[in-house]
């Protein structure tokens, strides 16, 4: 099993399992306070947000319903273009609902900016965003993100839902990859 050990691919651990769980508990407490008198529809963006959704939803004391969306952003290469295609839409009618979009990471912010506008056009009572991680690039886009777990440097990270070629999503921590993975 050693030869296939995923840990050997990790260069540096940015956030441990404990640090992530502590921060999610803080975010949940803040969200509970803000939504004290309202039900929340949490919308997870597949696939990256699966882990954050699972842990955040379990840390919330508010009444919550959960739904999922899958989107893909058209772009040249690795750069997100802001042109988004819906691969899987919500099952829920948003009319009058308090929507909380849950994301793993905001990089350029283009995808989320499009998504927020799209959901806002469906008649919800409110739309807010919660992201576990945010990169500095996001500052360039006019997008109001109410809940941010951690601000991270402009480095590619994996784990806790985040992937490289679909691998590493299952790690319970967040880290950077060793150079041999890229070569
Ligand atoms: P935007 O539109 O904000 O898109 O540029 C954010 C999406 O880009 C991906 N992304 C990453 N995925 N590690 C990853 O595994 C990273 O460091 C990273 N930075 C950006 C991710 O799919 C996110 O939803
Ligand atoms: Mg993603």
Image (spheres, grey):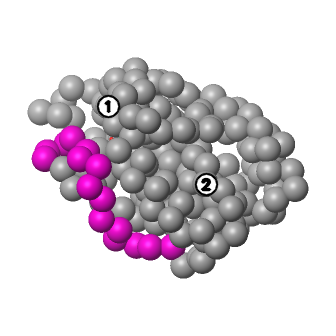
At 35% from the left and 44% from the top, the residue drawn is: 110
Q: Quadrant of residue 132?
A: top right
Is label 1 within 8 A of ligand 1 (CB to nearest ligand atom)?
Answer: yes
Q: Which mark, by number, is residue 67?
A: none
Reading the image, the residue beneath label 1 is 156
Q: Residues within 10 Å of mark 2 (few under 14, many from 20)?
A: many
Q: Which region shows up in magenta?
A: 76-90
**Is 94 contained in the magenta span?**
no
- Mark earlier in primary sequence (1, 2): 2
Q: Is residue 83 magenta?
A: yes
Which numbered tag is attached to residue 127?
2
Q: Residues within 10 Å of mark 1 (few under 14, many from 20)?
A: some
Q: Is residue 102 left or right of residue 180?
A: right
Question: Residue 135 location, x and y as percent?
Answer: 41, 28
Does residue 136 appear to the left or right of 93 in the view shown? Answer: left
Residue 92 spot, x, y in % from top left? 59, 76
Question: Which element type, helix, strand or loop, lies under badge 2?
Answer: strand
| Picture layout, residue 172 above or below residue 22 | below
Q: Where's residue 28, x and y in %?
A: 74, 43
């Amino acid at each position: 099993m050693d030869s296939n050990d995923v840990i050997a691919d990790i260069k540096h651990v940015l956030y441990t399992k404990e640090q992530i769980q502590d921060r999610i508990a803080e975010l949940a407490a803040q969200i509970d306070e803000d939504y004290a008198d309202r039900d929340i529809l949490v919308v997870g963006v597949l696939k990256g947000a699966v882990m954050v959704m699972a842990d955040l939803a379990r840390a919330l004391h508010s009444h919550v319903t959960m739904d999922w969306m899958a989107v893909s952003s058209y772009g040249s290469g690795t750069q997100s273009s802001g042109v988004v295609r819906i691969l899987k839409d919500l099952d829920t009618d948003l009319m009058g609902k308090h929507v909380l979009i849950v994301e793993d990471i905001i990089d350029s912010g283009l995808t989320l900016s499009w998504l927020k506008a799209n959901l806002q056009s469906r008649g919800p009572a409110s739309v807010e965003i919660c992201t576990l991680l945010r990169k500095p690039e996001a500052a360039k886009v006019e997008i109001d993100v109410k809940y941010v777990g951690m601000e991270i440097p402009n480095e590619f990270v994996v784990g806790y839902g985040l992937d490289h070629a679909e691998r590493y999503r299952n790690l319970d921590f967040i880290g950077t990859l060793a150079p041999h993975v890229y070569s």
